[in-house]
Amino acid sequence: MSDLLQVKQEMIERQLKARGIEDPRVLQAMGKVPREKFIPKDLVEFAYKDAPLPIEEEQTISQPYVVALAAEILNIQKDDKVLDIGTGSGYAAAVLSELGKEVYTIERHKTLAEAASKRFNQLGYDNIYVLHGDGTEGWPEHAPFDAINVAAGGPKIPEDLKDQLAEGGRLIIPVGKEIRTQRLILTTKEDGEFEKKDLGRVQFVPLIGSGGWLNREAKEVSPPKKEKTAKELIEDVAEPFNNPEGANLSPLLDRIGEARVVLIGEASHGTSEFYRFREQLTRELIQKKGFNIVSLEADWPDAAHVDRFVRDTDISLPEEEPFTRFPTWMWNNGEVLRFVKWLRNYNDGKSEQDEKTGVFGLDFYSMFSSVKAIIDYLEDIDPKLAETARNRYGCLTPYENNPASYGAAAMSNEYKKCEKDVTDMLYKILAHRVEETEKDGTRYFDALQNARLVANAEEYYRSMYLSAQSSWNLRDSHMFETLKSLMDHRGADAKAVVWAHNSHVGDARATEMGARGEHNIGQLAKEEFGDEAYNIGFGTDHGTVAAAHNWGDKMNVMNVRPSPEETIENLMHQVKHDNFILPLHKQGYEKLTTELEESRLERAIGVIYRPKTEMQSHYFQAFLSNQFDEYIWFDKSQAINPLPQRKKEEGVPETYPFGL
């Protein structure tokens, strides 16, 4: 129960306050009503997720933000009488009852009406009255109403509801001539006259009844012939191809232009086509545009093994085998191996180290491998400093097999010294900058980055224990700062490719992450480099994926569920091409850009995939053309090909708690 209270508070802070809900009475009501009591038991873990959830009769319970927004717009006072159309499970009515004197709620499905009435009685809501009937006709026996909330979209505002609105009353309803194209309309009544205000585009279930749609299958009004649908606009702009290896990348390279940072995503960590297309594009960027840095959503020491192989450097490496922590298949697979072998051959043709393209890790989960690499380096250049490092990093040692538990211990006074120790160690290594760079700049830079990693990882594990969203921001800030350090180290000719999940490379400001106060590499790159940063997202409809069901579980090849309606993936699935490159800002096709600026659900599969709760676990709101510059689509995809597993390190998976 304490976990639910915590996520409820996070919901209030991230989903409501962060989006502009300010009314303290509304925030108090949202905090008081237990949303978990209004959803099916098997979805309780998603009770405070920023998304609608399915209930009986193919209906949904609105996401918390929508309920709070309606309550704030209606400005319900403590003596107000409220009419609620579309009871559903009763969640919205319960919130409204915390604000007004009485709530009269109408539900057309008898089973839902009866269940809601029983639920209200059990929870002690004695000021809510339920009617099974046609909500578009209102409840005239109890009219007039000071506020009317309609939680379904109709073709117009029902006249019966307008007639039952009190003087000075407020009515909100989604209205649209098409079932799935609606605008949220606020209607107020002053001196017998009705004034309407458009509050923006929304999407609700259909309002069925005499004053709404006749039935759930009512045909949508066809758009004017002159106006093309989103599907048709995509087909006009899409650049189809048969497979990743056969795609014509020249137009894409032209659009990338003089960008210095190209961020190439993936919609899952286990889909072959994403890796293969990314490989082909990266080869072209290296050969034709001079890109010389390939940075991965991987740990720095692990990637150092790859970099020494492709550039033939003499960097000291940790004894541990790379990519043996969960999830091993993410980088230890045949698709990545093919690229690594190609890059080794490409670099063999370069006589100078500065001409070679390197491979580097951006992530910081390998805290203890980095500690070992630092000490090994210091043993060669300054044995006394190496001994200092052993002492300073000693407070971290008890948690080597379980770094996630370090955060709990770090909250005690005894272990707070670790924060200062690891930071001081970073400063000591920085003090050697000039001298050691002149001796061996590559080895010094590797040790410096490992020291930064340990300092940032120590802070990350502390913040993760506090369950703050800052843990995500710390991680992506570290990855971005690592990217900048790589580019600074490489010099004026530095050009970098980033390989990471869509959730990291797409601009966070165009997703619900931004509303929660979270940022990512894509956003930071756009803010830092402007037009010199170019980000590319991926998507698929169905096929197979390599993933685990839970943290630390073995990898499975799972079937990816076909995308549901009203998602970005379903829109792409309707396009006549199976695979295509979609420029999202192509000159002359501004209508497509505008169409894809509308909020839609987007799928994200990390190293964990849970098909049974896919809508709740793996979908989030996004504005595609604000999120990416390009979108690469594979209608059917297949799982990556993992290499035979080598020895596995023991302990809690260091990628906890993120799957992306």
Image (spheres, rainbow, N blue to C red):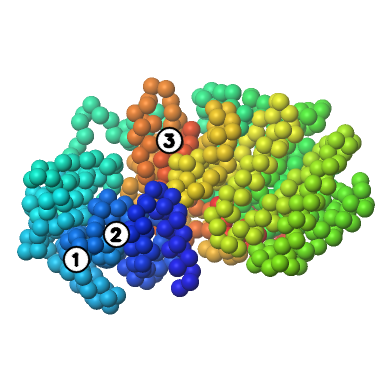
Q: Locate residue 239, reporting x and y percent.
A: 44, 30
Q: Locate residue 565, reporting x and y percent.
A: 32, 49
Q: Locate residue 422, reporting x and y percent.
A: 76, 54
* Foreground pick, 194 / 319: 194
Q: Quadrant of residue 198?
A: top left
Residue at image point 24% right, 58% down: 77
As drawn, 536 above or below 269: above
Residue at image point 30% right, 60% down: 61
Q: Residues within 10 Å of mark 3 (few under 14, many from 20)?
A: many
- Distance from disc 1 to disc 2, alpha carbons, whole Å, reads 24 Å
Q: Which residue is mark 1?
A: 102
Dot 3 amino acid type: Ser
The quadrant of the rendering that contains the N terminus is: bottom left
Q: Which residue is mark 2?
A: 60
Q: Secondary structure at mark 2?
A: strand
Instruction: Please name which of the two marks, 3 or 1, marks the residue nearer to the observer.
Output: 1
Q: Which residue is mark 3?
A: 625
